[in-house]
Amino acid sequence: MIDFRYHLVSLISVFLALAVGIVLGAGPLRENLGDQLAGQVEQLRTEQEQLRGEKEELSARNDQLSTFVAELGPELVEGTLEGRRIVVLTDDSSTRPGVERILELLTDAGVESSARIDLLPALWAPDTAEARSQAVQEIRGIAPVVLPAGPEDQLTDSERLSAVVPALLHREADDGLTPELRSQVWQVLIDHQLVSVDGPAPSPVDGVIYASAAPEELADENEDELVATERAQALLASQTSLLGVLDGTHLPAVVSAATPRNDASTGVLRTVRGDGGFEALSTTDRLQEPDGPLLSVLALIEQTRGGSGAYGTTGDAEQRLPALPETESLNDQMPDLEGVPQPSDGGGEG
């Protein structure tokens, strides 16, 4: 039978163990543990500094490679798109430097004609629904064939009008669209400020580059969270509708996006690269960098030859450059850039 003395001995043992722990913790064990923790913190600090240095070095080398490749641009693309008609679509003015460089490179490539079409915020903005509704009704009275088929409640007016753009750029033998009808539909889109066209309304083309801005450029910082979310969802639906129809036309097409901080985890690239429904489209990142516009044109050249891929330096890119005969010459001219980051390791921030 357990008596009082047993309980007393148990309590004394507990207090003795507690006292020994306090003494050891405040003495030799404390010093030993403190030294170990201090050593680990110092080691982590050293490793962090080392990694930061390596990151800066790789970023500098990536910038050097970008500049070098960009300088070779006219030479690489010369005569590769002879006689073709190409249009560049863009969704924000922040892409203008990249788009202008793309258009210059297309001229170097020998295109017969090139044009820029700006997709304007009214095409997807929450507060322009009335303008879109009117545009749909007008187009239905002019050339209903360019509007996507299906029940009225399956698509929004934004999605329908976004789908009209690639439909107008594609040549179908039996679509019944005369040049006059195409021009009238373009004018509806222009009159309702859904698109703006640099020059005359384009006729059917031989290739398309969609140059997309960084997601933060497409947002409105003055909107509250609810409206901002609605805008972002409408923008994504608009882009998805346009690119889905573009994919179905089988026109040579490239989606090129600005990727600040080498990040493609949001925006149109994430959508296209993550969805097998867009497998006919090529993609490039780095639109804002010196070599970004050249990547777009090289990818379009590959598209005209039946190839496709995802190019750049973000984590989901497949290769740095398209594997073309024109780019093979880079191996002989490449500066000593051993250690330049590849897509698999996330690249640099350049």
Image (spheres, helix red, strand yellow):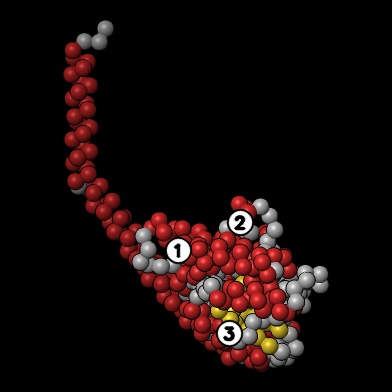
Quarter of the figure with residue 45 = bottom left
Amino acid type of the residue that numbered disc 3 sits on in the rendered structure: Asp
| Residue 211: image location, x then y, percent | 57, 76
* Disc nearer the start of the sequence (3/2): 2
> Who's the residue at 58% across and 85% down the image?
198
- The residue identified by callout 1 is 127
Q: Is residue 260 left or right of residue 144?
A: left
What is the x, y in percent for residue 322? 68, 77
**Around disc 3, counting alpha carbons within 10 Å, would you say few (fewer than 14), some (14 to 19), or many (20 or more)?**
few
Total marks shown come to: 3
Q: Residue at x 18, y 14 (%)?
A: 5
Residue for badge 2 = 155
Q: Say if 90 sits above or below 146 in the image.
A: below
SS class, disc 1: helix
Q: Residue at x 34, y 59 (%)?
A: 40
User: Circle 3 — which element?
Assistant: loop
Q: As drawn, is 253 to the left or to the right of 346?
A: right
Q: 25 and 134: which one is in front?
A: 134
Q: Residues within 10 Å of mark 1 (few under 14, many from 20)?
A: few
Kindly report the distance in space between the C-alpha atoms of the residues bearing marks 1 and 3.
25 Å
Q: Amino acid at mark 2?
A: Leu
Q: Which residue is mark 3?
A: 198
Task: Classify residue 176 as left or right of residue 289.
Answer: right
User: In the rendered image, is residue 266 in sight?
Assistant: no
Question: What kind of residue is marked 1?
Answer: Asp
Foreground tag (1 vs 3): 1
**Residue at 58 percent of width and 81 percent of height:** 197
Task: Look at the numbered disc 2 and give the secondary structure of its residue.
Answer: loop
Distance in Å between CA atoms under marks 1 and 2: 18 Å
Q: Position of residue 41 (x, y in %)?
A: 32, 60
Who is closer to the viewer here, 33 or 235? 235
